[in-house]
Amino acid sequence: MNLFLKRVFNFVLIFFSGLTGTLILINFLTRNSLILKLEHDKNYVVLGHSHSECAYDDGFIDKFKNVSQSGEAYLYTYLKAEKLIKQNENLEFIFLEFTNNQIQSSMDIWIKDKEFIEARYPDYSSFMSYTEYQIMASLNLSKLLLEIPSGIEQNILFIKNRKSNFLNNYGRHLKLDKLLVKQDLLKIDSLYAIEQSKSKEVSKLNIKYLKKIIELCRNKGVQIVLIRTPFHPLYLLNKNQDLYNAFIKSDFKDVKYLDFSRFQLELNELADTQHLNKWGAERYSKWFNEFLKLGRLDQPTVDSLILIENTRLKALDDFLN
Amino acid sequence: MLFNSFDFAIFLPIVFILYWFVFKKSLKLQNALIVIASYVFYGWWDWRFLSLILFSTLVDFLVGRSLGQENRETKRRVLLWISIIVNLGFLGFFKYFNFFLESFQDAFSLLGMDIGGRALSIVLPVGISFYTFQTLSYTIDVYKRKLEPTKDFIAFAAFVSFFPQLVAGPIERATHLLPQFYKHRQFNYALAVNGCRQILWGFFKKLVIADNCAEFANQIFNNSEAYGGSTLFLGALFFTFQIYGDFSGYSDIAIGTSRLFGFDLMKNFAFPYFSRDIAEFWRRWHISLSTWFRDYVYIPLGGSRGSRWKQIRNVFIIFIVSGFWHGANLTFILWGTLNALYFLPLLLLNLNRSNLEVVAHQKILPSLKELAQIGITFVLTVLAWVAFRAETISHAGQIYAGIFDYSLFSIPREVLSSKMLVCIALVLIFVLMEWIGRRREFAIEYLFDSYPRWIRWSSYMMIIFLMGMFMQTEETPFIYFQF
């Protein structure tokens, strides 16, 4: 019996040592070979989840690249930002989406849930440090272990194609064709119920990584601007606006913050209450481009430009009606 | 609890340590631990159905005791029927109630009569067909005086609920397994190592072969109207390997796990896809069920004795009942009937026992004749699996019509993908491994046995690594759980 247990123990030990060694070696090779390079004329990037992914059509914005990705928690954004800053000396500004749902505890699901680990871990495994592995292991060890081979497989692919630029794997503008129809807005009761059911607690992990991103940018001399992308007013229904304001005024009072949420959108410019469709993204991105050209990244400028745009839109509507 | 779950990965070492370290000195306590562990294992899925197992155990234990004390034949027969009615009653209710109700409704509606009745929403208890047959074997053997009735309730409960084989077999005979619970068990290093290898191979079959083939089999069977003959045949091929990998994989894990606890379970699969005729296939496929039906149904019916008509009748009964055992669906009956039809020529020509030895016994490769025999038997089996996998008879008919079409000779471009080619390559490697190990209990039983340990261990690690690379991330239940 003792011999059996000893050999089983040795086998498991050798196996896991081998696996860890392989993981470390492949992660090391990937880390040194994976290219996430911006074009030379791009100095601005926007990072965040689906809100910014759908809103910023970088085809209409000069010097700008959208590297946002749906369902991305700040943990992954941090790893991506670290890589982008390291590989792109021309990067001057990071616009980082910071909206109401990113402080909710449900954000932890974006790190620990099966489908999110499946979607993110293989691409990010080589960026992750011991700390991130520890966090993920504490949240969902079994899923993490199951995904390790996929991570190795993906990294082998990266190493094999080490001359290619994989930036688009890590985020790009998503064009949505969908239209928000009035019937969607009539589902107000169900939207309300969904929001009610969500925990009002804060995701400490997401906030922690948001702070890490800010610190990283400051240390590396890259300017960071927190932004809130436009959405339909119903998005704020029963949302945590007070809590959100409190964060802006306390934890992030030293960080530049621009709120574009009052940018008025027509129903046919929205895919749903929180995402712009491609028509909305086009108008907003063109407007955003003009805003950037002014070179005054402050809230009064944002507000006055939004006011002008909203007035223009209203006049256009009145004319058409 | 699924074998391919983290729950089981934690459960097994705990039970193992308790079994060999804490309760090592007491046989009674070891058996009691097996009962508790088995009930936890089963209850993990749905604890309510533990009452069914417990009730079956109690009934058969008491019937067995009474049979042991009773000499009057009439009363013994009554006792046997009590056990049969209780066990098959549960099985019939949970598994076949709705099927018979709907069949009667359909039959009467053809005559223009509405007999009413409403289908019940019944949850089929996992593994009910397996443990019911296992416990029935005890009563029947006691009735036939092949086995002394047990006085040890805990040992009997452990025999009925033994967790490695509780939910999907092998369906053990009381004469083989029950006595093992009476004997003091010593840890056997060679047996345990062999068990670990068999578990590893079982997981490989399930996670790499079955689950990957399932993806393509499901894709093709679920959209069968859209595909031509070659794609449908490819789908049937994928299902052929899915069901083999799934079920024989489960059996390997069950047998291997039992070995860790010092038990020897019967072999359930013996490389059936290398069979040279259907009779050989049925001696190698789901052996525990085939022999159960042979011993408790076929032989009592007269077996291969008597007139030709009686022999043919018995063959059809055994195959159709075997098909019906799998589920309340006419597709299973069609599957059984097809196999009976395949078997019939062999019976009529007295060729049903012509291939008893393993194929190419002393050789590396089969002869051309053997290869042709294997090929024909394999294709017949693949075609029969279509009926097994189809949702309904008309679905099966539609697939058969699609297969027997000129499009069978086209290249199945519509589904070919690099992922599918990888899966096909894995299946080919698997078939090669099985061929090399076909004289063994399982393919990797003596893999690199004469080589140094580091080579053996490297090969096991390679298998684990392949599992990690190609396994699906979902925990997929075993197909035979539904039976």
Image (cartoon, rainbow, N blue to C red):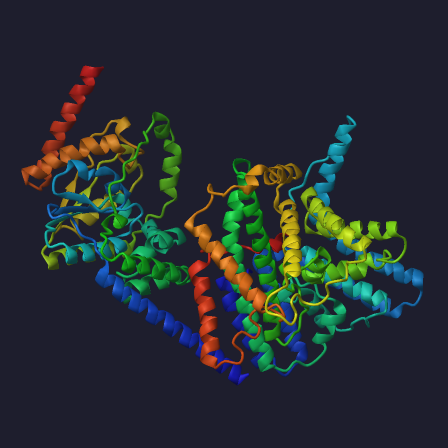
> In this image, B301 relative to B46: left or right?
right
- Residue B360 placed where, x, y %? 65, 67
Q: Is residue A207 above or below residue B228?
A: below
> In this image, A134 relative to B204: left or right?
left
Q: Quadrant of the N terminus of chain A?
A: bottom right
The residue at the far front in this view is: B368
Q: Is residue A107 above or below residue B44?
A: above
Q: Is residue A110 above or below residue B117?
A: below
Residue drawn 36% across the image and 59% down it: A153
Q: Looking at the rendering, which quadrant does residue B151 occupy? A: bottom right
Residue drawn 46% across the image and 58% down it: B471
Q: Is residue B261 above or below residue A53?
A: below
Q: Quadrant of the C terminus of chain A?
A: top left
Depth check: give the residue in front, A231 or A177: A177
Q: Looking at the rendering, which quadrant does residue B187 occupy? A: bottom right
Depth check: give the residue in front, A62 or A213: A62
Question: Can residue B56 be seen by looking at this rendering?
Answer: no
The residue at the far left in this view is: A295
Depth check: give the residue in front, A9 or B231: B231
- Residue B256 placed where, x, y %? 59, 70
> In this image, B187 relative to A79: left or right?
right
